[in-house]
Image (cartoon, grey):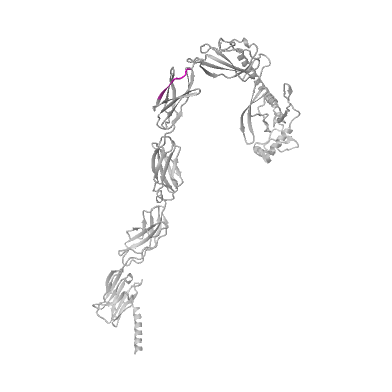
Amino acid sequence: MNKWINGIVLVQGLLYISIQGLTIDLEGVLVEDRLVVGGGHVVLPCPGGVSTRVEWRCRGCFSISETKETIVAELVKSRPENLVYPDRIHLVPGDSGYNLEINPSFTQDSGKYFCLLNKEAKPTVVYNLAVQDVASTPGKPLIMSFNSTAVNLSWAPPLQQHHAPVSTYLIQILEGENTNWASYTTISTDSPETTYTVPNLKPFTVYSFRVIGKNKIGPSPASLPSYHMMTLREAPRGKPTILNTRNLSSSSIQLEWRAPDLDSINGEFIGYRISWKPRTSSIRPQFLDLKDPGLLEYRLTGLKAFTFYLISLQVMNPEGLGPPASVTVTTDEGVPSSPVNLTIITITNSGLIMQWNKPEAPNGNISGYRLFYAAEQFTNVKTINSSADIVTGEIEGLDAYRKYHVFVKAFNSRNEGNSSETIQVGHKIGQYNRYRVYYRRKDEESWRKREIIVPPVPSGSPPERILLVNLTGQEYSVYVQGYTQSLYRENLQYPGDTSEILHVIPGRDCNRVQVSPMREGGPGRLGASHGIILGCLAVILVLLIAVVSLAYWRRSVMKKRFYIPAYGGCSHQDDIMWDIQVGGDESGRTCVQAGGFLQHVQLLHAEGDSGFHEEYQNIKQGITGNPVLRVQSPGKPVSMKIYNLDSFQSRSSYLYLPEPWSIDPIEFWMFINKSGINTIVSVDTELDNLFPREPRTYGSLDILPGAERSHPSFRIRRFNIDQRRGKKSGSRYICTR
């Protein structure tokens, strides 16, 4: 019996599995919709009365398939069996039979529920249960495009919206790369669309995004965050804060500031641009880029004095400049420029009245002027407090017959300006009424003096003369200085400028020269000679004729010496180098072509200038014969040996001195002067005895060193030869310069 019962049970189990696989045809059955919010209590009645067998089924529940049927619970022999989720889905007796109770309900419980009584083929009613809940998680947002302030996002919608369509999406915005999602901002799309452009972002900032779907039940879980992205740069929106400005001088201003917030730079912070211009000027401002973001102060220099400047400061990034922070500041008062048009208005008995115009560049507020007047070793000044455009000033208490130098300067509260042009004025300067003649012999150190008192003479009278007696036949130096007697002080005399110094040699019968009448202040007689002047003119004329004749003679002789070589110059086809002999003697040496001259010079410079040394030895070997000249001086013969040398195309063009260090300098310079030599080439540089660096006198010649110029491989020095000559016959006196 027990075995049979067990066998029946086994057969019943097999029948249960078989029935579960059958699909009930629900066509034409009454459908009743049941909508419930997830988590709510659901009771589905089973109409038809009490039955001994009740079976509750659900099509599309607990599965993604809408056709799959599942037996949820059943009543077998008056015993309910809860087959699916028995903790919350079970059979409960009701008024008309066993009802199906779901508590709490979930979205997976949604489906078509129906009950079968006593294995009937179709149910009486079908309950279409829809459990509403929040949508499932949307897809990860993707960056489609972006600029400096906006990002275009796209994402996939939730797979399950749970019978409550998504009406809008929430976008969570995370700013920064090393931050977490504990702090973010949220915006709503106000649309079920799955694309959106996020506005109002910061330029040059890192962002990440998450998406949440929202229906009438509530928001879904947040999606995975997007990949980090950075918005593009744009010009800075922040500007520095100017803290302090001050003028350091009349040409400089110090500027101090505080940098703006870094998030307002909108890009890489590369520095500042400072610009400035006079406030009232219409010219474009000057500017300077300061490529140092850490710089917080700067000094502007080279500004105009006492000028209002508009100074602007901007931050820079690679996209451009930010808004300017501007300030107006003035430079300090500077040095006034020179007053202009200084003129003499009137010369009074005791002073001067001057007039001038204000400086063209006052560089401040002119407070007044200082009028300077200087004479000899003292300088006086008069202050005139006036700021007019045209100013007049009077100088009083000037000394008569004295030269004054007058100039004026403007001044302001801080500086005294530049001086005007200087005017030289003589206050009551009259004619000289006495002269002093200074003279001395060549070998004397001190000057002798003769004073002459001259009566007033009209302008244009003949020159004054004086006769100096008891002189020897040696050379004398003479100059004259005039004096004016003070009208107020008997012992005061105002000296004038001195004449040039004349060098004279007294001649015979000098005392016969007629002189004009004058009164001497000391012992001696009056007079001077017209013959001195005539003699000087005659000597100068003779010397000029001699120089012209000598120049003509030298030119004629040198012209006759010029010759043209027999070989007729260079041929264009001649490529033989000048320093290579063609034959066995020098006659085979050719000229240097113009195109090969630089190469020729480079060869001479090679190996320590060996080419030049060889050329110099060849020149020395080209000395022709014995010495051709010997210069003699009174008392002894000159020891110099002088040879003729030929140049490239001229005979005897050079004179060669083989041992210059052993030559007497007097004989050397006398020979140079007599021969009319203009150029001396010295191979030996240690010849200070012949070429002095200080003025020297060699006999009757004064050798005066002139300018010197240094070149990479040689120096050029200039010497002036000054000779005092005397005539061997004729008058015994002569004038020279």
Q: Position of residue 615 (x, y in %)?
A: 70, 36
Quarter where residue 188 is shown: bottom left
At x 73%, y 29%, the residue is 643
- Give the residue at the far bottom of this rendering: 1
Above or below, 713 against 491 in this view is: below
Q: Position of residue 450 (x, y in %)?
A: 58, 14
Q: With 70 as the anchor, is 598 left or right in this view?
A: right
Q: With 406 as the anchor, is 52 left or right in this view?
A: left
Quarter where residue 163 is shown: bottom left
Above or below, 163 against 676 in this view is: below
Determine if the magenta segment contains residue 83: no
Q: Position of residue 556 (x, y in %)?
A: 68, 23
- Give the residue at the far left of this rendering: 95
Tell me which segment is drawn in magenta.
391-400
Principal secondary structure, stretch drawn in magenta: strand
Q: With 709 as the anchor, is 162 left or right in this view?
A: left
| Front residue of this view, candidates 376 and 600 | 376
Q: Position of residue 126 (x, y in %)?
A: 28, 74
One can see residue 471 in this view: yes
Above or below, 10 against 431 in this view is: below
Q: Quadrant of the N terminus?
A: bottom left
| Front residue of this view, candidates 322 and 371 | 371
| Front residue of this view, candidates 109 and 736 | 736
| Front residue of this view, candidates 291 and 197 | 291
Q: How many marks?
A: 0
One can see residue 463 in this view: no
At x 43%, y 33%, the residue is 334
Q: Quadrant of the C terminus?
A: top right
At x 76%, y 28%, the residue is 626
